[in-house]
Image (cartoon, rainbow, N blue to C red):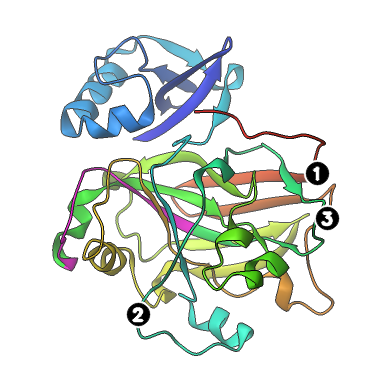
Amino acid sequence: MKLLTFSHENRVKIGAILNENVVTATGNIDCGDNMLQFLAAGQRGMLAMQNLIDSGRHQLALADVKILSPVLRPGKFLGLGLNYPDHISETGFQKPEYPTIFTKQSTCVIGTEEAIHCPSVSEKLDYEGELAVVIGQRCRHVNVEDAHQVIAGYTICNDVTVRDWQQRSPTWTLGKSFDTHGPLGPYLVTVDEIVDPHNLTLKTWVDGELRQNANTSEMIFNCYETIAYLTQVMTLEPGDVISTGTPSGVGVKMKPRGYLRPGQVVRIEIEGIGVLTNPVIAEPDNFVAMSN
């Protein structure tokens, strides 16, 4: 299934894609009104959603809704740095012995077609196309061989980064967490539709120029290894997002620098998941991130 969060007639709902339609789950199945509640319902929720799809009822035209981030406010939004050998080579870092984990604050989350803000305090705005994992069940101390069982599905992340602010903090948190700098989407594609998350083509374009072209098979630490590593430390919960790192081709390493500017458009495509597209604009005055 391709699950989504969307807005229709000024109401935020969840549902699933069926051809060119959206099957509306909110109010039609008893598994919560938002994606976090739905994922927490586990297999009961997935079965109810599938039954709703099969019924042929409660459909809207996809063109009539606004697609939002599949998870509006993940409890945890974790990122994995330095996870592609070619990206490590272009940055000059050493291959890490353990996964390099950082946090993006959840107020940075936006959906496809929403605008990335070029911040007033920096001109070093960069893109990072990535595969993201969405957790489907509460878990701790997960073995690598069992990690696939705790994943609800996959989505696309643009790990937007303000490079000078990233370097101000050894944890990278500030440079990774500006409002609008966590685009996710367009859908949450359930695990049954992704045969192998570690063999997916990932491409990033800026204004039609192909900047990144890689395959998730190149990751140093794969999705399952990362989950196993994280759950030695913390409990992961439904809706938590783990973005798995970016390949080479980021703007900071281009000559001249390929930083993002207002008026540009970033487009990220991952095989089997879809396309995440975001325009870039100057930061509006007095912007406040949308509440959950």
SS for callout 2? loop
| Quarter where residue 251 is shown | bottom right
Amino acid type, callout 3: Arg
Q: Residue at x 68, y 44 (%)?
A: 278
Vertical side of 113 occupied by 161: above or below = below
Determine which residue is flagged by label 1.
Answer: 281
- Indicate the position of residue 16 as horizontal and vertical percent values: 39, 27
- Indicate the position of residue 145 as horizontal and vertical percent values: 15, 65
CA separation, marks 2 and 3?
A: 34 Å
Compare residues 233 and 142 and report the one nearer the observer: 233
SS for callout 3? loop
Q: Earlier in the sequence, mark 1 or mark 3?
A: 3
Determine which residue is flagged by label 2.
Answer: 98
Which residue ends up furthest to the front in the rendered image? Answer: 169
SS for callout 1? strand
Q: Is residue 207 left or right of residue 278?
A: right
Tell me the number on the disc at residue 261. 3
Give the residues drawn in magenta, as a range.
131-144
Vertical side of 152 occupied by 141: above or below = below
Which numbered disc, 1 or 2, marks the residue closer to the eye? 2
- Whether residue 20 is visible to the viewer of this picture, yes or no, is no
Q: Quadrant of the N terminus?
A: top left
Q: Is residue 54 left or right of residue 207?
A: left
Q: Residues within 10 Å of mark 2 (few under 14, many from 20)?
A: few
State yes or no: residue 142 in magenta: yes
